[in-house]
Amino acid sequence: MDGEIPPGLDMFETLGKAGGGAGALLTGPGGFARDAAQMRAAHAARGAALEAAGIPRGAVVAAMLPDTPDAAETALSLCHHLRLVPLNPALGADDLAHQLAASGARLLLHDTPLPALPGDVAALRIDCASGRIAGRAPGELPPGAPGLVLFTSGSTGLPRPVPLDLGRLYLSARNIARWLALGPGDCAVHALPMFHIGGFVDLLLAPLLAGGRVRFAGGRDPAALAGAVQAGGTWLQIVPTMLAAMEAQYTADDWAALGARLRFVRSVSSDLAPARQARAEALLGGVPVIAMWGMSETAGQITSNPLPPGARKPGSVGVVAGEGLVLEVTDAAGHALPPGETGELRLRGPTVMARGGAGAAFDEEGRLCTGDLGRIDGEGYVFLAGRAKEMINRGGEKISPLEVEAAALALDGVLDAACFARPHATLGEQVGLAVVLAEGGPGVAALEAHLAGRLAAHKLPRRIEAMAALPRLPGGKVDRRALAAAEGAEAEGPGAEVEGMAALVARAWASVLGAPPSGPQADFFDAGGDSLSATQMIFEVERLSGRHLEAGALFDAPRFADFAAHVEAAPPRAASGIEDEGLAFVAARVAEWPDAPVPGWPWAVRLPARAARAAPAGAPFFWFCQHPREYRALGTALSEARDVIVMRTLFQKVGKDEAQARALARHYADTVEALAPGDGLLRLGGFCEGGRIARYVAEALAARGRGTALLVLWDHWPSEPVPVPSFHVWSTCPIRSVGALMVAPEAALHAWHPEGADHVILPGIHEQTLARAPDPALVARLQRLIDGQEVLPRRAVPEGVAPPHGPQRHLYRAAFTLAAPRLAAPGGAFEARVAVTNRSPHEWRPTVESGLHVVLRTRNLDNCLRSNLAGHAPLARPVAPGETVHLRVPARYPQVRLPVWLCAGMIDNGVARFGERSGRGGRAVRRMMWPLLP
């Protein structure tokens, strides 16, 4: 195809042959006008001027021309004679040298002042008005075929050259003309630079091939666009930031005048937020705004929404809109994914650049790897999820900047928005957001509140920067790297000296994060905090201040001044009575145990190391449980090497809650430090509810600077990730073990325990696995782990398990209806029909991305309520807000002979978690199940 123009498409071969009528026309400010005959004659004159200057046809030649109508006409003509490399006149010396070297150009034609050129590049001046070239080209020039060499935007690295021959340019122009139904009555408003693919193909070749006209706007500001439309323009092609500027400057009359003349507006180059599209169409009185997607590497258009009466889907860039183009969504290995799943978009077709050039990535099947992520729905509409290299990796959680930007732009008064990655000390990257706000519109605080209702907590920007304008690359895309660099360079001053309660908070801040707060507005999480250090901060502030704080207090008030005020208003810990109540309960129960309490510590029992060993091998092993049968056999076996200290949970305490459990853990941390003084690493473990207390004790100790080397969790799955090496023991109990509560805990074991983990499965019913003599092999392994002779393995998180991201603040609000058999035998299988309605303001992603499953659980109605996994089904496709999906969920009744409730819910974080987190919405229509008695 190189160098060939498809038959019947050569514009300069047909222009003017019918007498130079108005079949094609270029117009612009200052009286600029070219009819078809004039364009054809000027094209021939430029060819003669090139020959006279010693520049052969097809030579690779760069051009740096001003942003004027006659320069645009010149560039269009030159690309038919040369392999033209149009360059941005604003390039500095370094960028210019890079693009000249990358394209192979050794000659530069210019009609604008030049920066310093590399020594091996010559320059000749060309007069855009007349086409004359001053001087002759020195030496031989690299050969090629007529066409263009454009450069990518450079948003994720150095700009790459993209060679495109005339055949590809013309095919793309024909696709655009047909898709937009362009004809002689249409006039395109040209307001894009000529170093952009749209300036050549979309706004010159396509309308002129259709026999239409082009009106140069003479600028990209709203006034210039409005003037060009009033001068005869019938369609606009602009980037979303131009729409933002129009929103800020146009009056209602301005919009009405545009709407009366325009047939459509075409949005290109960057993502068009659905809210911005809806507002623009309303302001234009129903004129359609057509979102599309294209690339330099494909000579422009790949997909586009159709004109009316075709459907335009908000948030979509439309369907494939090019003859012969084949677009697929693939996984990392290049395997095609089914409709609805998100992956990399790969492409083949006649307009795609030739393989092997410009550093573009092609796979083994010859498909262009676009680097864009997206999905294709069942009707063929494409939804972009952002550039793979621009995804924000927040502690393993991948966040699309487009989603955050769309949420911000949905608020009236937000004119422009750019989401970008900010560096973070522990998470790697954090979400940053810069916005342009309308004068008199919402402030940053209103935007923060708006986003909190639309985005998951881990997607929320920690700080929003209001700017007069966003930095942009020459092609119009947001320069996210410049935003990130500017954010990193900012630092808040120390502010006034703090005293009183604020001084205690600052002391705790410095202890946990290693540096004091930089000022009143310093954000704990921006300063390097994460979910674990937030827990440590709460414990440390409680210890220093004597105040009682809720576990999520720092998430609700992450800025230093706000958190200090929150602490000041918090009640004293003693006033709550939580500690004394819990300790009194456990001390009374421990007094009934067969083993005597530790003197001075009435809530702890010691199993001393046996005399067979000369001395204990280090600090005691601390075990938390509910009953003597849950520690005596195991403790006796483990106490061969060291003391075993046992403490009781709040199990069976009436009215117990999370605050009491954490308060008890703080007291137990005091006990641990007193019975194992020093700074050595500790070994803790617990059975069932005792595993939770062991975790809380480890967190309290970490807040004081005391580390834990091992957690042994017996039939307990943590509700949050635990950054401590953890060894799990799971029974085969069908109603109480981890296996009865989880979908597939072994799949998420290492996501939940990044410092190392392993597990064993013991046959038996829950506490019965501890009531009997423990397996010698298990005891031997526990001894090795406790002594530090064995290290738990770290492994990569399996595909399909979303890495945990700390406390989840987002609500997966849903409505459920549930139909299932009313009677069945214990352990019997059945299939339930579940209808789930997405009542949240955001789209649910398929399981492979989000980890979301619909689950069935049963709740026993005996005097010990238990929640057990009955069955689950994954989400196979995206679920839009307000949409209802119907699932058939295979399930099995638990092995109980008591009535149970059956209900539906959601799980997230891969296939690991069961049940809703605290505060999550979603209520099923429940039905009583009466398993048949034998």
Image (tube, grey):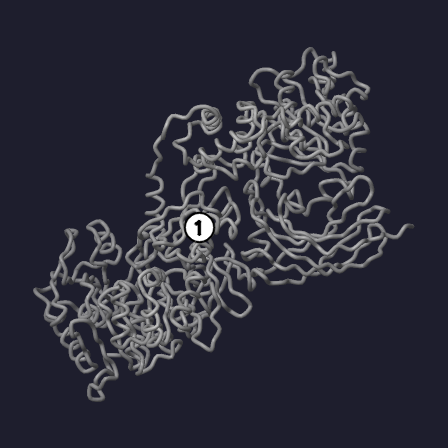
Q: Nearer the viewer, residue 136 or 609?
A: 609
Which amino acid type corresponds to the residue marked 1 in the rendered image? Leu
The outermost residue toward the left is 135
Q: Quadrant of the N terminus?
A: bottom left
Q: Nearer the viewer, residue 243 or 597?
A: 243
Can the viewer see residue 664? no
Q: On the picture, is 445 further left or further right than 657?
A: left
Can the viewer see residue 132? yes
Q: Picture quarter containing residue 836?
A: bottom right
Q: Position of residue 423 (x, y in %)?
A: 41, 40
Q: Position of residue 371 (x, y in %)?
A: 42, 56
SS for callout 1: helix
Location of residue 599 with respect to 882 vertically, above or below: above
Location of residue 179 with respect to 872 vertically, above or below: below
Look at 45% across and 40% down and name the residue there: 428
The outermost residue toward the bottom is 18
Q: Position of residue 773 (x, y in %)?
A: 80, 27
Look at 43% across and 67% down and name the residue there: 348
The outermost residue toward the right is 934
Q: How many marks?
A: 1
User: Which residue is under mark 1?
Assistant: 447
Q: Position of residue 474 (x, y in %)?
A: 28, 57
Q: Nearer the viewer, residue 820 or 142?
A: 820
- For label 1, the crowd category at 10 Å Cα-Cα, with few meaning under 14, some 14 to 19 and many 20 or more, is many
Q: Nearer the viewer, residue 345 or 88?
A: 88
Q: Picture quarter containing residue 776?
A: top right
